[in-house]
Image (cartoon, grey):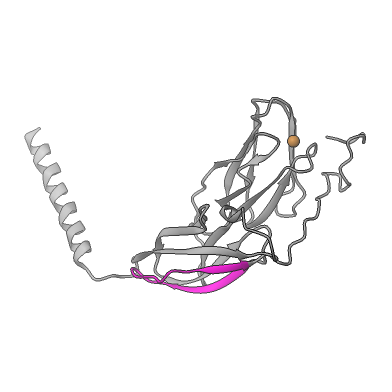
Amino acid sequence: MSHRTKSAKSVNVLVLSSAMLLAALPPTAQAQGAVEGRVSITERAGEQTEDIGNTIIYLVRNGAASGRLGAADATIAMNGRAFMPRVRVVPVGSKVSFPNQDPFSHNVFSTSPLARFDLGLYPSGRSRDVTFRRAGVVPIYCNIHPRMTSFVLAVATPYYTQVGADGRWRIPNVAAGEYTVHIWHERATPVERPLTVVASGNPAFDVTLDARGFRFVQHRNKFGREYDRSGPDRY
Ligand SMILES: [Cu+2]
């Protein structure tokens, strides 16, 4: 028994010394840095940005396969005839659940070629889910309520975030290297910029998106037709 305790102790000491050794070494290929910045949107004259928090930022490493991504399951609730939140970013392979928190039924569907699905009509308190297996932006709707819209961005990288209500964002622990930064907002032209990430002292990465070309277009229902309350194909 005492012998066991002793060997466990010496293993601990060994682990500790290697950790100290690593800490003393200069930055290597394992170096990681934080990247942060601020997003703003150029709007048409007289219009103000109220949805900057729906902006997604993700970093894709140049010339490298994304490797195995850990799934990060997420939730988009249906509440008050809206998808909450409106925008979610998840790594490819993640499952997104759609719980119905309203006292009446909703439908959830997408006609996107990246993830075509129809979860059917389900009542209050029920939840159904979709696993997003391909990278890209998937618009999601309800076949009963034409104003209900959400977007899932499935990304092939572990480095992503959604910006705050003040437009600020930060992604910690990014492996040093060459990246392409992608900035997405539903009303703006998507932006891609190169970025070199170093272990410390990355300069602020500020971007202004352009939403002046945006025009709202009502999406079609899951049958590819206009929403019609009196029609026979509501769900
Ligand atoms: Cu609905």
Q: Nearer the viewer, residue 26 or 191?
A: 191
> For residue 212, which quarter of the picture?
bottom right
Q: Whole-percent x and y of residue 50?
A: 61, 53
Q: Is residue 15 left or right of residue 110?
A: left
Q: Whole-percent x and y of residue 184?
A: 61, 61
Q: Is residue 163 left or right of residue 231?
A: left
Up the image or down, 4 lies above or below 157; here it is above
Q: Nearer the viewer, residue 109 or 62?
A: 109
Q: Whole-percent x and y of residue 74?
A: 55, 42
> For residue 215, which quarter of the picture?
bottom right
Residue drawn at point x = 42 percent, y = 64 percent = 35
Q: Whole-percent x and y of residue 162?
A: 53, 54
Q: Residue furthest right?
A: 231
Residue drawn at point x = 55 percent, y = 73 percent = 193
Q: Which image quarter is the N terminus in? A: top left
Residue stretch rendered in magenta on the structure = 191-209
**Residue 41 colored in magenta in the image:** no
Can residue 159 be seen from the camera position used here? no
| Quadrant hosting ligand 1 | top right
Up the image or down, 230 lies above or below 200; here it is above
Q: Nearer the viewer, residue 235 or 11?
A: 235
Can residue 108 be seen from the camera position used here? yes
Q: Residue furthest front?
A: 46
> For residue 173, which quarter of the picture?
bottom left
Q: Nearer the viewer, residue 71 or 46?
A: 46
